[in-house]
Structures are given as structure tokens and as C-alpha cells.
Image: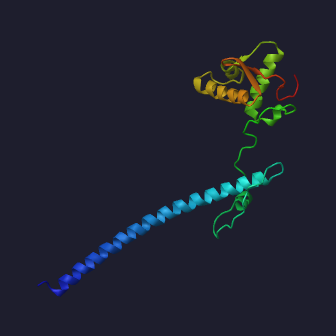
């Protein structure tokens, strides 16, 4: 028959192992909880920013739902008060329509329109992306040229430019460059 002290030591060892295992699990859960709370906070901030953009003049706030914010969570209003808004203004390319000026585009897209407008004004025909890269003082390497091609294709898709031949871009009918002249 085992001694009483030996049995107590075995039970104590088992209890200590169980406590250690539970502490490790609690630490893992705490770490997972911290990550989940951070992600949740970021999504709440994103939702509030979208709500603020949609409720701004000219926005569509239908469908924005106000919810209670739990205590201790940083809200979009607090973020706006503490740091400048990170969203880049006019970074999207709007669909072209009659009367929409080239100034509605971001600076990079305006540069593309201006270079093509100059080309049209001089009667030199469509512009390639390699020629654009050279005109902008960029290295004519695939990464730079493809970046310009991507922007030019986006302008074609939104109706600002036309692509009469593959890789050659000109202003679409009715479009004037960022200066508004033509």
C-alpha cells in the first residue's frame, strides 16, 4: 500500500500540471482576444469612416446604421480628432460625362491627360506608355511602363481615353485635358 505522503505528492503534481496547462491556455486565449479586439476596433473605425463619407454632402447615407459603441473602443470621431484622415482624396477615377473637368482626377491621371492633350494639340497621334514614361522623366523599365499602362487602361475603361490601337492612347471623343481647353 502506498504511503499517504506519496499519494498527496502525486495529487499535488497532477493539480500543478493542470494549473500550468490552464494558465498556458488562458495566456493563449488572452493573446487571441487581444488580436480579435484590435481587428474588431479597426472594422468599427472603417464602418464609421464609411458612414461619415456617405453622410457628407453629396453622399448617400441610406443604409448606414448607427450602433452602440462599447466603452473603451476608439471610435472614428476620436480618430478624426487625433489624426488626419488617411484616405487619399480623389484617388478613384470617375466615369467621364459631359461637363466633368479633368481636375476631377488625381494628379497622376491629370498628367497622363495633359501629355495626351499636348500630343493631340500638336497633331502627333496616339501616345504609348513608353513615350509617357519618357515625357514624365521616368526610367523606361517594365515596372514604370506597366504602372502607366494600368492607369491609362483605367482611363479608357472610365471613358476618359480611347485606345485606337493596342498600347496607343488618345483622348476620347468630347474629352478635354485637365486644363479644360482643347
Placement of 150 over or under 64, stated as above or below: above
Position of residue 24 in the picture relative to residue 156 (left or right):
left
Query: Is residue 83 among what the camera can see?
Result: no
Placement of 7 over or under 30, stated as above or below: below
Placement of 149 over or under 56, stated as above or below: above
Residue at horizontal 79 percent and vertical 25 percent from the top:
114
Q: Nearer the viewer, residue 72 or 167?
A: 167
Placement of 47 over or under 95, stated as above or below: below
User: Which quadrant of the structure image shows residue 67?
Assistant: bottom right
User: Which quadrant of the structure image shows residue 3?
Assistant: bottom left
Q: Quadrant of the C terminus?
A: top right
Residue at horizontal 71 percent and vertical 24 percent from the top:
136
Query: Is residue 1 among what the camera can see?
Result: yes
Number of numbered discs visible in the structure rendering = 0
Q: Position of residue 7 (x, y in %)?
A: 20, 82
Extreme-bottom residue of the structure: 4
Extreme-left residue of the structure: 1
Q: Quadrant of the N terminus?
A: bottom left
Q: Nearer the viewer, residue 81 or 28?
A: 28
Position of residue 1 in the picture relative to residue 48 (left or right):
left
Residue at horizontal 45 percent and vertical 65 percent from the top:
29
Position of residue 16 in the picture relative to residue 177 (left or right):
left
Q: Position of residue 163 (x, y in %)?
A: 71, 20
Residue at horizontal 79 percent and vertical 50 percent from the top:
60
Describe the colour scheme in one phrase. rainbow
Position of residue 178 in the picture relative to residue 87 (left or right):
right
User: Which quadrant of the structure image shows residue 100?
Assistant: top right
Q: Position of residue 11 (x, y in %)?
A: 25, 80
Q: Position of residue 12 (x, y in %)?
A: 27, 80
Extreme-front residue of the structure: 63
Amino acid at each position: 500500500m502506498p504511503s499517504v505522503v506519496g499519494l498527496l505528492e502525486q495529487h499535488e503534481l497532477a493539480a500543478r500540471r493542470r494549473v500550468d496547462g490552464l494558465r498556458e491556455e488562458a495566456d493563449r486565449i488572452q493573446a487571441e482576444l487581444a488580436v480579435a479586439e484590435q481587428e474588431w476596433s479597426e472594422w468599427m473605425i472603417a464602418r464609421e469612416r464609411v458612414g461619415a463619407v456617405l453622410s457628407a454632402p453629396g453622399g448617400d447615407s441610406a443604409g448606414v446604421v448607427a450602433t452602440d459603441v462599447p466603452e473603451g473602443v476608439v471610435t472614428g470621431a476620436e480618430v478624426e480628432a487625433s489624426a488626419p484622415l488617411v484616405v487619399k482624396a480623389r484617388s478613384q477615377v470617375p466615369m467621364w460625362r459631359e461637363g466633368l473637368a479633368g481636375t476631377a482626377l488625381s494628379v497622376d491621371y491629370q498628367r497622363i491627360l495633359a501629355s495626351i492633350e499636348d500630343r493631340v494639340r500638336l497633331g502627333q497621334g496616339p501616345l504609348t506608355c513608353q513615350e509617357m514614361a519618357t515625357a514624365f522623366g521616368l526610367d523606361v523599365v517594365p515596372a514604370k511602363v506597366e504602372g502607366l499602362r494600368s492607369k491609362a487602361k483605367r482611363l479608357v475603361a472610365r471613358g476618359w481615353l480611347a485606345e485606337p490601337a493596342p498600347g496607343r492612347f488618345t483622348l476620347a471623343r468630347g474629352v478635354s485635358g485637365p486644363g479644360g481647353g482643347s
